[in-house]
Image (cartoon, helix red, strand yellow):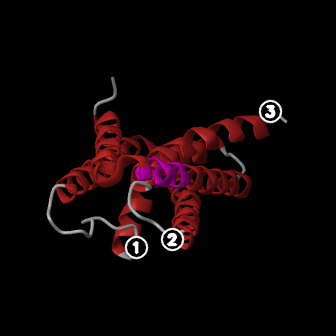
């Protein structure tokens, strides 16, 4: 029971970044089908990244943990800045869309921290399938919640929604890069 609770709390903690990022990306005009696809993609990445981390954890955990966080922070800053810039352009279409390569970048930036957690868990011998299943399910659910809440807030903010979403992503990326 103790291991289940630990993994549950850890999966919620890891999924909260996906929630925050989803809240920012939800400011874009997304259809329900896109929201479902984005949540499932984030969930899959939150399974693959810790699996890769757990696999490599015994050999290189100290070196890649910090690098993964830095890369994730940089990707979020880039996404945030491009969304903010795009919101002030005369073009109706946002620069960053969570489809195609944009969805890949979005999912990767949201799940890089779970890679570093996977590295640590690999050293301690955590149950691999239980861990990655919980990480994937929780991040998928929290991403959906963030995207849906972002979509509701976007209706209130109108044309400033994309800029606000970009600010959320930018702030989250800066927080990762410069923890206070």
Q: Which mark is residue 48?
A: none
The verdict on residue 148 being magenta is yes
Q: Is mark 2 on a helix, strand or loop?
A: helix
Residue 41 appears at what percent x and percent y?
53, 67
Q: Looking at the picture, does residue 168 appear above or below residue 39?
A: above
C-alpha span from label 1 to label 3: 39 Å
Start and end of the magenta stretch? 146-155
Q: Which residue is drawn at 57% across and 65% down?
A: 44
Residue bearing the label numbered 2: 34
Residue bearing the label numbered 3: 2
Residue bearing the label numbered 1: 99
Of mark 2 and mark 3, the one earlier in the sequence is 3
C-alpha span from label 2 to label 1: 8 Å
Answer left or right for 113 relative to 50.
left
Label 1: how many Cα within 10 Å (few below 14, some 14–19, many 20+): few
Label 2: how many Cα within 10 Å (few below 14, some 14–19, many 20+): some
Q: Which residue is drawn at 40% across and 54% down?
A: 27
Select label 2 or label 3 by which is in front. 2
Q: Do the residues labelled 2 and 1 touch (CB within 8 Å)?
A: yes
Q: Can residue 38 be seen in this view?
A: yes
Residue 124 appears at what percent x and percent y?
63, 40
């Amino acid at each position: 029971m103790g291991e289940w609770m630990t993994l549950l709390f850890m999966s919620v903690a890891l999924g909260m970044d996906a929630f925050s990022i989803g809240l920012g990306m939800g400011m874009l005009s997304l259809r329900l089908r896109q929201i479902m696809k984005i949540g499932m993609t984030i969930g899959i990445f939150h399974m693959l990244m810790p699996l890769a981390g757990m696999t490599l954890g015994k050999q290189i955990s100290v070196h890649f943990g910090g690098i993964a966080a830095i890369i994730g922070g940089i990707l979020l800053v880039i996404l945030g800045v491009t969304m903010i810039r795009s919101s002030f352009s005369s073009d109706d279409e946002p620069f960053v869309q969570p489809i195609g390569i944009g969805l890949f970048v979005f999912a990767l930036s949201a799940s890089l921290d779970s890679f570093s957690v996977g590295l640590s868990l690999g050293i301690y011998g955590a149950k691999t399938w239980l861990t990655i299943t919980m990480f994937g399910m929780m991040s998928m659910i929290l991403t959906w919640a963030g995207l849906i809440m972002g979509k509701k807030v976007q209706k209130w903010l109108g044309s400033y929604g994309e800029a606000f979403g970009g600010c959320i992503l930018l702030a989250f990326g800066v927080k990762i890069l410069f923890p206070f």
